[in-house]
Image: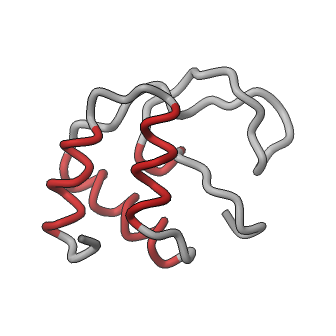
Amino acid sequence: MKRGMLCLGPITHANCGAYCTRRGYPCEGCHTVIENEDILKFGLLALSEAGFTAEKIIEAARIFSFDGTERLKEVMKDVGML
């Protein structure tokens, strides 16, 4: 994220296997959206503070076929991202 590349790790569970821009080897995140609302809020705020918009986060989540994009939107509304 510090390189300006969106990593869904802060809001997901492990094991998608995609290239991780942060570590340079297969990703250990992005499997599915975290269900614990407090952790999800913390992760979304971290992504927001890193400069990523709600739209970019949702777009990335759709690429990984998350069932939870509606859940993401709900929590984003709670933290003021939408």
Residue placed most toward the observer, 65 or 38: 65
Which residue is at a point 18% across and 50% down the rendered structure image? 37
Which residue is at a point 24% across and 71% down the rendered structure image? 82
Which residue is at a point 37% across and 61% down the rendered structure image? 44
Residue 21, image x, y percentages: 78, 47
Which residue is at a point 71% across and 68% down the rendered structure image? 4
Residue 22 horizontal side relative to residue 72, left or right: right
Residue placed most toward the observer, 73 or 37: 73
Residue 35, image x, y percentages: 23, 37
Residue 3 horizontal side relative to residue 68, left or right: right
Residue 31, image x, y percentages: 47, 25
Residue placed most toward the observer, 77 or 47: 77
User: Can you say whether 52 is above or below 27 in the image?
Assistant: below
Q: Quadrant of residue 6?
A: bottom right
Q: Quadrant of residue 79?
A: bottom left
**Residue farthest toward the right in the current orientation of the protein:** 24
